[in-house]
Image (cartoon, helix red, strand yellow):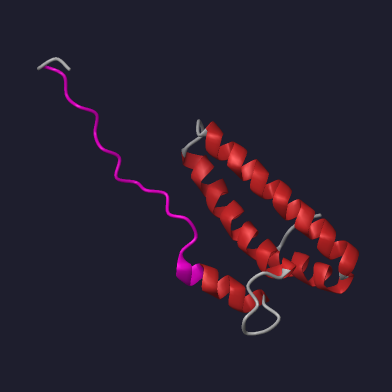
């Protein structure tokens, strides 16, 4: 670097994943019993929360193509879980779609 050049400013904005508190809230809303952390409903709700956070991230970081690929993978994973839930428990599927405000 030349002496008359200024260094690039350090970015202070850090993308934080879904907080532990928010994760606990989402799990509490969608679980079947106290220790339920892996049911389809909980997984879909957590993926939806992550997808919404990433969608906000891409409104300001349009050129984050690697992150966008990750977002598409999350959307695909949620889609597969939704298809599974629809096949196995249609009532639970309809309830979850309404709660999460997902369009189908």
Q: Is residue 14 above or below residue 5?
A: below
Find out whether residue 20 is within the magenta segment. Answer: yes
**Camera sees residue 85:** yes
Residue at 50%, 69% in the rendered image:
22
Provide residue 97's location: percent of width, then percent of height. Answer: 77, 64
Q: Is residue 21 left or right of residue 75?
A: left
Front-lying residue, 70 or 6 = 70
Find out whether residue 58 is within the magenta segment. Answer: no
Provide residue 60's location: percent of width, then percent of height. Answer: 47, 40
Provide residue 90's location: percent of width, then percent of height. Answer: 88, 69
Q: Is residue 46 above or below residue 63?
A: below
Q: Is residue 91 above or below residue 72?
A: below
Residue 104: which quarter of the image?
bottom right
- Magenta stretch in the rendered image: 4-22
Residue at 37%, 48% in the rendered image:
14
The tally of labels here is 0
Residue 9: which quarter of the image?
top left
Residue at 60%, 73% in the rendered image:
27
Residue at 17%, 17% in the rendered image:
1
Q: Is residue 93 left or right of residue 64?
A: right
Q: Residue furthest left?
A: 3
Provide residue 47's location: percent of width, then percent of height. Answer: 63, 58
**Camera sees residue 103:** no
Q: Is residue 19 left or right of residue 33?
A: left
What secondary structure is the magenta-colored segment mainly? loop
């Amino acid at each position: 670097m030349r002496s008359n050049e200024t260094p690039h400013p350090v970015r202070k904005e850090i993308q934080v994943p879904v907080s532990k508190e928010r994760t606990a809230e989402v799990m509490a809303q969608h679980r079947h019993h106290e220790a339920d952390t892996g049911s389809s409903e909980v997984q879909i709700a957590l993926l939806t929360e992550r997808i919404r956070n990433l969608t906000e991230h891409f409104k300001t970081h349009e050129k984050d193509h690697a992150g966008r690929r990750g977002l598409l993978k999350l959307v695909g994973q949620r889609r597969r879980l939704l298809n599974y839930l629809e096949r196995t428990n249609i009532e639970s599927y309809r309830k979850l779609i309404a709660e999460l405000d997902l369009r189908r």
